[in-house]
Amino acid sequence: MKGEVCKPVRCILAVAMMMAVPALALGDSPAGAASCLGCHPAKADDGPVPALAKLPAQQIVTAMLAFRSGTRPATVMDRIAKGFSDEEIDAIARWYARANKK
């Protein structure tokens, strides 16, 4: 992206993807799922950002929709959530919830 101005959300997602890909065996992950690992830990460690794999799918969907609509306060998740369709949010949530059952 030499010489280009990077939009903040795209920069965040690009950096998150670069950090997350080596950290996770992606297998059959849906598009966008790996970008979450830039902030959300792969394993539950009770850090400041919740591990998505320990959350039920519906909780992730509800949170993402609230971030996207602006009804849930956020620092960056409101902007990130706007980049995903309902179908993508559902697929990512189900994928992370499935990881919790393993």
Image: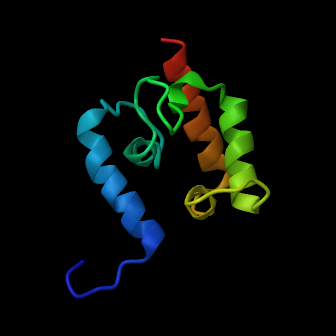
* Residue 37 appears left or right of 19: right
Residue at the bottom extreme, as displayed: 3
| Residue 100 placement (x, y as % from top left) | 53, 18
* Front residue (pair 70, 61): 70
* Up/down of 66 relative to 4, above or below: above
Image quadrant in which you'd find residue 39: top left
Image quadrant in which you'd find residue 42: top left
* Up/down of 71 relative to 35, above or below: below
- Color scheme of the displayed model: rainbow
* Up/down of 97 relative to 18, above or below: above
* Up/down of 13 relative to 6, above or below: above
Please give the name of the residue rendered at 64% of the width and 56% of the height, measured from the top-left corner.
Answer: 74
| Residue 37 placement (x, y as % from top left) | 40, 41
| Residue 24 placement (x, y as % from top left) | 31, 32
Please give the name of the residue rendered at 52% of the width and 26% of the height, measured from the top-left corner.
Answer: 53
| Residue 68 placement (x, y as % from top left) | 70, 59
Residue at the top extreme, as displayed: 102
* Residue 95 appears left or right of 60: left
Please give the name of the residue rendered at 36% of the width and 78% of the height, measured from the top-left corner.
Answer: 6
* Residue 80 appears left or right of 27: right
Quarter holding the N terminus?
Answer: bottom left
